[in-house]
Image (cartoon, helix red, strand yellow):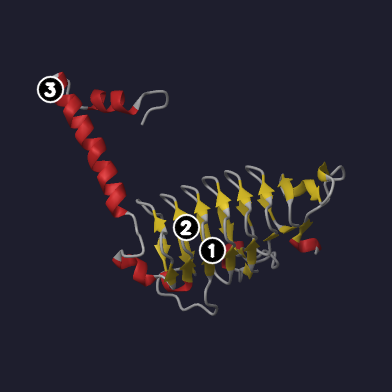
Amino acid sequence: MLPGRPPGRLALRLLPSWLPPLFRQKATSAIHGAWEWICLYGAIGPDHPRAARFGSFGAGSFVAFPPGSVYNERWIRIGSSTMIGPWVTLSAGMAPGQQMITDPVVAIGDRVVIGRGSHVVGHLRIEIGDDVQTGPYVYVTDQNHSYSDPDQPIGTQVPHDAPVVIGPGSWLGAGVIVLPGARIGRNVAVGAGSVVTGTLPDHCVAAGVPARVIKRYEPGSGWHAVRNVAGATPVDEA
């Protein structure tokens, strides 16, 4: 799709110009209608054969079509009434068929919404609490490359694993990255494009690279700006 062009108009332009306008309009409608039908019936729900591959797949949940890279579902558990957007990658381990040392590797709670194009890439333990919502293109992983040996290529060194927890009721804006060892508390808002590397307490707003607390909620007095923006502890300083 070209930027700034309405999709219907673009589809008409791509069809052969010698076709009658009415035929081209009907062809465009048919193409869009077929795609909507494919997306509707291609989604994975609790009764879909692929749902049986997951460690658990709750009632009322679905993985939208088209999915991203989804494998080793046996170690992935999805709660009830959860919506996984299109093009979302859900994976446990490096490659399909890998035997994992923890179960579940990825645990997604109830009433969770994961935005389109996001990645949840687990190797040890990723826990996403109930009622968590994310914007599009969020990346969550519990494994990162190691660079401790300066004489070895980074890609060949043993990676670093650390569990990740995203507390219930939290919101992750578009493009947020959550790295190994991150612990996000309850009802936390993380600003778009932030990189979470450490601990964010309950009831706060965080933003930046690395993410730092910029607002906190205090019972009895409400929300307050955090002036020294030193509310988050990076993993390597913990």
Residue 136, placed above or below residue 143: above
Of label 1 and label 2, which has the lower sequence position?
A: 2
Give, as a three-letter code, the residue at label 3: Leu
- The residues tagged by marks 1 and 2 sit, at their Cα atoms, a distance apart of 8 Å
Residue 226, placed above or below residue 11: below
Query: Residue 12, position in %: x, y?
Result: 24, 24
Q: Taking the image as drawn, is residue 72 in sight?
A: no
Instruction: Report the front residue among 11 and 216.
Output: 216
Q: Tell me which corner region of the image, top left, top right, bottom left or bottom right, holds residue 60.
A: bottom left
Q: Tell which residue pokes out farthest to the front in this image.
A: 220
The residue shown at (55%, 45%) is 135
The residue shown at (17%, 31%) is 27
Instruction: Report the front residue among 16 and 110.
Output: 110
Indicate the quadrant containing the N terminus: top left, top right, bottom left or bottom right: top left
The residue tagged 3 is 19
- The residues tagged by marks 3 and 2 sit, at their Cα atoms, a distance apart of 44 Å
Give, as a three-letter code, the residue at label 2: Thr
Tell me the crowding category of disc 3: few under 14, some 14 to 19, or many 20 or more residues within 10 angstroms, Cα based: few
Of label 1 and label 3, which has the lower sequence position?
A: 3
Tell me the crowding category of disc 2: few under 14, some 14 to 19, or many 20 or more residues within 10 angstroms, Cα based: many
Q: Taking the image as drawn, is residue 67 in sight?
A: yes
Instruction: Report the front residue among 158 and 183.
Output: 183
Q: Tell which residue pokes out farthest to the right in this image.
A: 228
Q: Tell me which corner region of the image, top left, top right, bottom left or bottom right, holds residue 179.
A: bottom right
Of marks 1 and 3, the one in the foreground: 1
The residue tagged 1 is 109
Label at residue 82:
2
- Asked if the residues shown at circle 1 and circle 2 are in contact, with their CB atoms under 8 angstroms apart, the answer is yes
